[in-house]
Amino acid sequence: MKNQQLVLAERPDGIPGPQHFSSVTTDIELTPPEGHIAVKNLYLSIDPAMRGWVSLEQNYLPPVAIGEVMRSITVARVVDSNHPDFAEGDFVYGMFGWQEYCVADASFMVRKLDPELAPVSTALGALGPSGLTAYFALYEKGQIKSGDTVVISTAAGGVGSIAGQIAKLTGCTTIGLTGSDDKVNLCTEEFGYDHAINYKTCGDIEVAIKALAPNGVNVFFDSTSGAIADAVYPCMALHGRAIQVGTAAIDSWIPTPTGPRRDRYILTNRLNVSGFVILDHMGKYPEALTQLASWYTEGKLNYKESVIDGLENAPLALAQLYEGVNLGKQLIRLAD
Ligand SMILES: NC(=O)c1ccc[n+]([C@@H]2O[C@H](COP(=O)([O-])OP(=O)(O)OC[C@H]3O[C@@H](n4cnc5c(N)ncnc54)[C@H](OP(=O)(O)O)[C@@H]3O)[C@@H](O)[C@H]2O)c1
């Protein structure tokens, strides 16, 4: 069997794009050894985390090697199984990479999906890493509670769209920060935000937030760092919690970027600033997925996907994440 793959050809200096990946076709034997499954990828997830994965900068996973298939979580269909928990035809979630087919160890991060519960693509978004990130960052790190004012950056994206809804379902006042008027409307009309700010056109972001949060921001869900975070820290309330979920606004960490000092706000307002990585919460995924699925089936969780067809378009879709082109979770579809 022929297997089209996208491999890392060159390490980007900044934002990754099509010039950094090569398409190769290899032969693959779809006969899994014991404990393994052979799968055909249906959907690939396009994640801001990928910029870190292809970089040599400090990270929580080792860098993808030059010539290696690009790391990616995907939704796939089992074409052959040599593992008792999986059968041909099952839909699965796993780390199967930017390629058509994969033979993988079924005990490593593979989860069977129920196509009756929701479209299987949601396992890459609302009922997968995006939803889990929103859930654990808000509850475990942010300790959100009813009455809190919560500010969320990348508010209309895969993670932000779910984070806004979870905070709202918990009784918080929610303020989303996003990069276009269309996304502002999406935030307030579909993702339940009380307020949304177009950070590109609002003028002084700090002034705009203070007008909406006169008593201060209790929880800051920070997916961008950079100028947006610089504007939010002076708005934080006493004993506020800031969660570093991502750094989408920083093109490169080499050399280390400089900016305004936050230390005085952290000290005087006794802020609790914490870093978040979803992998630390794996043991509790089932509990969170049950809650997310229940909100979804009750119609309380809206989600949106930006879907582009074709494996070859994955690098372009990745680059476009940094232009804010996506509305909701960005996916590549290889097959249904
Ligand atoms: N720590 C974890 O375990 C974990 C897990 C999953 C995701 N994350 C993080 O969560 C964040 C959102 O991820 P996602 O998958 O849901 O992506 P996403 O929000 O769907 O897409 C990325 C968004 O980032 C915004 N953006 C891009 N460049 C920006 C810049 N220079 N300044 C400000 N905003 C910029 C754009 O939205 P606008 O048009 O609104 O600017 C873009 O749509 C990312 O930072 C990601 O790394 C963290």
Image (cartoon, rainbow, N blue to C red):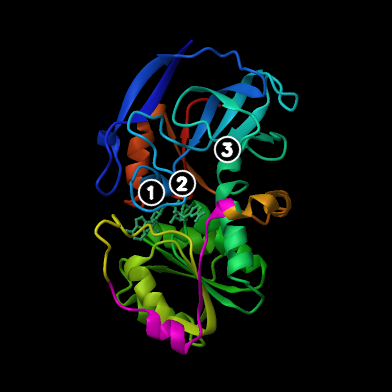
Question: Where's the C terminus, which quadrant?
Answer: top right
Q: How far, Cα to Cα, is label 3 from label 1?
A: 23 Å
Residue type, label 3 = Ser
Residue 61 has which mark? 2
Task: Mark yes or no: residue 142 visible.
Answer: yes
Q: How far, Cα to Cα, is label 2 from label 1?
A: 9 Å
Magenta residue check for 328: no
Identify which residue, 54 or 206, lies in the foreground: 54
- Judged left or right of residue 119, residue 15 is left
Residue type, label 1 = Gly
Q: Are marks 2 and 1 in contact (CB under 8 Å)?
A: yes
Residue 253, by quadrant, is bottom left
Q: Which residue is mark 3?
A: 121
Disc 3 residue lies near ligand 1 with CB under 8 A? no
SS at mark 3 in the image: helix
Q: How far, Cα to Cα, is label 3 from label 2?
A: 24 Å
User: Few, some or many C-alpha atoms within 10 Å of disc 2 (few <14, some 14-19, many ≥20)?
Assistant: few
Residue type, label 2 = Leu
SS at mark 1 in the image: helix
**What segment is highlighted magenta in the picture?**
259-279
Disc 1 residue lies near ligand 1 with CB under 8 A? yes
The earlier-in-sequence mark between 2 and 1 is 1
Residue 108, by quadrant, is top right
Instruction: Give the residue at x 37% y 79%.
Output: 262
Q: Nearer the viewer, mark 2 or mark 1?
A: 2
